[in-house]
């Protein structure tokens, strides 16, 4: 039973015109993730992305994140079947007057919410299920927030390894410049104990993911599709300081409180992640993006090699 009060909601709400919607989505996602765990969906799913970072690592020191990103847990799981299981579990679900529905936008499932505290306006939740992780999955408990006094949360959830989650953000920043990924990377790099992440492993994983984004990768049991707009890993993007004008999504002002200075974020990114340009010989080869390096890439990808012929 949810004992959410207007006072707890107000305490949880960031400043700004859409802050109440962000807070309601955040709470609705807590309830949803808890129910999905109770239903056994995390026997097939791994939590990842910015929402996982907020709920399982950062708590109130992180930004609000509206999307729900997952990977299938095992390479032998069929992503389409798992997606169907997930959408069927969500569509029509009601949890203590929080109701959930799924609709498609450009072929992609979107979660819509109705809450006892009003509708959610101006923000939406994209639902994404990707191929299995490369690095071993871990389990983490929730970072407790005052609002959690109003409802229970699962003991732990399976989550993508922090380094791999970061590597996916690095790979996205290799082709576009979403401010939310910059914010997340800078937060991790500046926050103990997470700042002690394995830098060489992050660099290698990111370089490999950029190659796979460019060419795709297929095994007998899993596929990583080519990503539109993908490019080989570009070391210069981690040495040259970007500015606020380079960012192509400005909703960080809605989702982070206080609103960060984008120029300061860009400077911190360059300072803390310059090591990404310090490539070894193999990594430098993969940055050329040559399709003939496929077998070498397969051999280097953790958890891909055992199931690949």
Image (cartoon, rainbow, N blue to C red):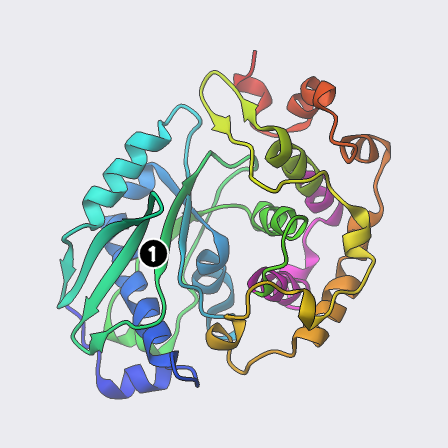
Q: Secondary structure at mark 1?
A: loop
Q: Report if residue 184 lies within the magenta region.
A: yes
User: Badge 1 local density, few (<14 within 10 Å), some, or many (20+)?
Assistant: few
Quarter of the figure with residue 195: bottom right
Residue 83 location (% of width, % of height): 31, 38
Q: Report if residue 199 lies within the magenta region.
A: yes
Say which residue label 1 marks.
155
From the viewer's perspective, is residue 98 above or below residue 46? below
From the viewer's perspective, is residue 232 above or below residue 96? above
| Magenta span main SS | helix
Please state if 98 lies on the left or on the right of 289 as rendered.
left
Residue shown at 51% from the left, 37% from the top: 133
Residue shown at 76% from the left, 70% from the top: 267
Quarter of the figure with residue 97: bottom left
Magenta segment:
180-205
Residue 174 location (% of width, % of height): 68, 49
Residue 67 location (% of width, % of height): 40, 57
């Amino acid at each position: 039973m949810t004992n959410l009060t207007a006072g707890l909601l107000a305490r949880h709400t960031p400043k700004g015109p859409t802050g109440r919607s962000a807070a309601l989505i955040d709470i609705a996602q807590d309830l949803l993730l808890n129910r999905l765990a109770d239903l056994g969906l995390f026997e097939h799913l791994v939590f990842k992305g910015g929402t996982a970072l907020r709920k399982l690592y950062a708590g109130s020191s992180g930004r609000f994140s509206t999307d729900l990103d997952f990977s299938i847990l095992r390479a032998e799981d069929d992503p389409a079947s798992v997606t169907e299981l997930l959408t069927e579990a969500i569509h029509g679900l009601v949890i203590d007057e929080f109701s959930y529905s799924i609709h498609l936008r450009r072929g992609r499932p979107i979660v819509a919410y109705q809450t006892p505290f009003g509708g959610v306006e101006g923000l939406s939740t994209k639902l994404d299920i990707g191929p299995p992780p490369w690095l071993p999955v871990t389990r983490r408990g929730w970072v407790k927030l005052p609002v959690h006094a109003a409802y229970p949360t699962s003991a732990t959830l399976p989550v993508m390894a922090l380094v791999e989650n970061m590597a996916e953000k690095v790979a996205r920043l290799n082709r576009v410049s979403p401010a939310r990924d910059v914010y997340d990377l800078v937060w991790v790099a500046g926050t103990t104990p997470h700042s002690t992440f394995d830098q060489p492993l992050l660099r290698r994983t990111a370089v490999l993911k950029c190659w796979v984004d460019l060419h795709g990768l297929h095994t007998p049991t899993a596929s990583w599709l080519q990503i539109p707009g993908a490019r080989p890993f570009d070391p210069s993007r981690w040495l040259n300081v970007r500015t606020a004008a380079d960012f192509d999504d400005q909703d960080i002002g809605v989702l982070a409180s206080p609103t960060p200075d984008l120029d300061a974020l860009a400077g911190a990114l360059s300072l803390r992640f310059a090591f990404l340009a310090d490539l070894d010989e193999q990594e430098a080869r993969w940055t050329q993006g040559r399709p003939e390096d496929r077998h070498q890439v397969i051999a280097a990808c953790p958890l891909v090699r055992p199931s690949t012929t």
